[in-house]
């Protein structure tokens, strides 16, 4: 008798034989595939069994098919020719989201023709990530009603449970099924991987002659899988999190997008919706998206394209590889951020800088805003928020920004600064912040004394009007970055004090438990009582 091998049961690639489970949408998929003429769009996260389900359904219908993938360069040429073919049978286009807009548009038009003619000789099946159907309809709105869009969500736990249980039964072993199902987060692929790893760690390589118990802790399995994935995915994750222009003092927009992805149940996020949920990262991430920097960054890095996809039309960001999703989902983000090189990723304010200036100084303010934004800081510059200001009570909108929502207010002071209505208004909001190192003046060289003379006593930047404006803005931006760097690192510990590693407070030496420890008396007592600090 030929032994049944582990790799045949819990498959890491290809279509499974022993552990195939019909997805919830299987019946609907089957009917859609046998309906003449109508195109079929199957969308959903990677690793939930979309391609496997389509192939299995076509086998049941005894339909021959050709499978093409937009990932393969050789296939892309064939895909482009599909609209000009007749009688080509069932054609599967996998990874549809990777095609060019021109090709997507041609296929959309072709699907409309097939549906209207009820052509039985040709059928196109599109497989893609979440919102692949929406992406297709963007190119042909009248296609709605002419294609079946079938959404594969996360697989329900009972389906993943069925997969793992069937594999365990085939191998004659007992697995911690419930814990593996929980760790698989709805992915058939991850369930296969976790089960496969649990078997290897227990020495199971083929079907046992007698029933045996697999006793390896699932936590150990998860750690092993995470360590193995780190070898493949740590460098790309670090590369994406750093972004194309790494700024250790900045707001880490690329890192935060990656973290938001890791928290998504669907492995796909709408960045527009995420921005509403994360006000402290909104400005910096918006600059990356709206400036085309995210799209350009991914276009230039083929290695990242294999893992992450961004649709600039819908502003949808998605994970391409379920193993990569598992890796980022199990990252320790504070430690990961340190490894990338960021000083701090916890922000107490919505903006790093709010710019205050009069109209004659707008060119310098705009140049400074661009320099700071390029360094991935969150900057309030009024021209960037015109859409929000429209129809708003301007005073109510601006007042909290200058009073408290920006870590620093940068006042660009020229001769007309004290005479303008809005600079007077802004000055009233941040006047109470003098003395807290929150207001940074930038004086034009040779400016006459003004009503804002109290700012003469604050460390200031002097703008040289004889130097190129861009150079002055760049020089000032570098100094401001150093200021934020110092702020991000946290307060300095005075010579006569210490930082308690338990409560993270700076305290006088008199409250230190012993000269050999960095714990205060209260924290030391907790440790002696058996508590962790």
Image: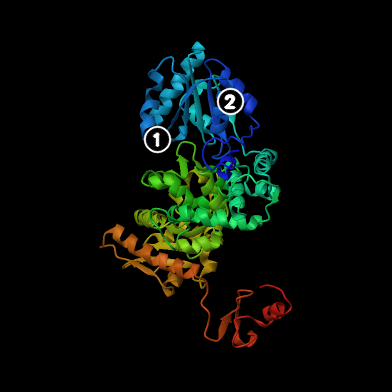
Q: Callout 2: few (<14), some (14-19), or many (20+) C-alpha neighbours within 10 Å?
A: many
Residue drawn at the location 41% of the way across and 43% of the way down: 295
Give SS at disc 1.
loop
Q: Is residue 173 visible?
A: yes
Relative image position of residue 268 (x, y in whole percent): 55, 42
Q: Residue furthest right?
A: 529
Q: Residue furthest front?
A: 1
User: Relative to 129, is 476 above or below?
Assistant: below
Residue drawn at the location 54% of the way across and 52% of the way down: 327
Q: Quadrant of residue 412?
A: bottom left
CA gap, disc 2 to disc 1? Answer: 24 Å
160 to the left or right of 339: right
Relative image position of residue 517 (x, y in whole percent): 60, 83
Please say which color scheme the image uses: rainbow
In the picture of the structure, the residue carrying the numbered disc 1 is 72
Pointer 2 with pointer 1, Cβ within 8 A: no
User: Relative to 194, is 524 above or below?
Assistant: below
Relative image position of residue 259 (x, y in whole percent): 54, 52
Q: Nearer the viewer, residue 23 or 448?
A: 23
Looking at the image, is mark 2 or mark 1 earlier in the sequence? 2
Numbered circles on residues, count: 2
Q: Which mark is residue 57?
A: 2
Q: Is residue 294 visible?
A: no
Q: Nearer the viewer, residue 307 or 463?
A: 307
Give SS at disc 2.
helix
User: Relative to 86, is 125 above or below?
Assistant: below
Q: Residue furthest top?
A: 117
């Amino acid at each position: 008798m030929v032994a049944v091998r582990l790799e045949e049961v819990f498959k890491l690639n290809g279509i499974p034989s022993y552990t195939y489970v019909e997805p919830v949408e299987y019946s609907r998929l089957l009917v859609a595939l046998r309906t003449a003429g109508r195109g079929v769009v199957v969308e959903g996260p990677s690793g939930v069994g979309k391609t496997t389900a389509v192939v299995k359904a076509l086998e049941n219908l005894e339909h021959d098919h050709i499978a093409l993938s937009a990932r393969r360069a050789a296939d892309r040429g064939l895909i482009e020719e599909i609209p000009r073919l007749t009688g080509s049978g069932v054609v599967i286009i996998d990874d549809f989201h990777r095609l060019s807009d021109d090709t997507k548009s041609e296929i959309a038009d072709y699907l409309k023709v097939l549906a209207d003619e009820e052509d039985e000789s040709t059928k196109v099946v599109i497989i893609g990530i979440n919102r692949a159907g929406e992406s297709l309809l963007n190119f042909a709105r009248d296609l709605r009603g002419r294609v079946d869009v079938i959404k594969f969500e996360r697989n329900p736990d009972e389906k993943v449970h069925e997969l793992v249980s069937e594999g365990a039964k085939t191998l004659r072993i007992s697995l911690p099924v419930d814990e593996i199902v929980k760790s698989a987060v709805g992915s058939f692929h991850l369930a296969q991987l976790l089960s496969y790893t649990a078997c290897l760690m227990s020495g199971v390589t083929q079907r046992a002659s007698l029933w045996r118990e697999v006793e390896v802790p699932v936590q150990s399995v998860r750690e092993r899988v995470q360590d193995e994935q780190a070898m493949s995915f740590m460098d790309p994750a670090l590369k994406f999190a750093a972004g194309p222009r790494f700024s250790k003092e900045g707001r880490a927009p690329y890192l935060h997008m990656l973290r938001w992805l890791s928290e998504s149940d669907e492995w796909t996020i709408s960045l527009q919706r995420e921005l509403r949920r994360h006000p402290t990262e909104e400005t910096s991430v918006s600059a990356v998206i709206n400036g085309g920097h995210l799209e350009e960054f991914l276009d230039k890095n083929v290695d990242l394209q294999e893992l992450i996809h961004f649709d600039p039309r819908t502003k949808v960001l998605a994970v391409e590889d379920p193993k990569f999703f598992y890796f980022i989902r199990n990252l320790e983000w504070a430690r990961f951020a340190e490894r990338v090189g960021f000083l701090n990723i916890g922000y107490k304010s919505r903006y790093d800088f709010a710019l205050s200036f009069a109209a004659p100084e707008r060119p310098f303010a705009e140049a400074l805003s661009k320099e700071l934004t390029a360094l991935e800081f969150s900057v309030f510059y009024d021209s960037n928020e015109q859409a929000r200001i429209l129809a708003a009570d301007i005073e109510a909108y601006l007042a909290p920004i200058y009073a408290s929502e920006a870590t620093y207010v940068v006042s660009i002071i020229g001769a007309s600064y004290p005479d303008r209505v809005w600079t007077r208004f802004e000055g009233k909001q941040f006047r109470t912040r003098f003395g807290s190192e929150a207001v940074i003046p930038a004086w034009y060289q040779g400016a006459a004394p003004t009503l804002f003379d109290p700012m003469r006593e604050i460390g200031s930047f002097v703008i040289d009007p004889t130097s190129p404006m861009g150079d002055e803005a760049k020089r000032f931006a570098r100094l401001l970055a150093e200021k934020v760097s110092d702020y991000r690192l946290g307060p300095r510990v005075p010579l006569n004090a210490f930082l308690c590693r338990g409560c993270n407070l700076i305290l006088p030496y008199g409250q230190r438990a012993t000269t050999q420890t960095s714990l205060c008396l209260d924290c030391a007592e907790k440790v002696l009582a058996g508590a962790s600090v």
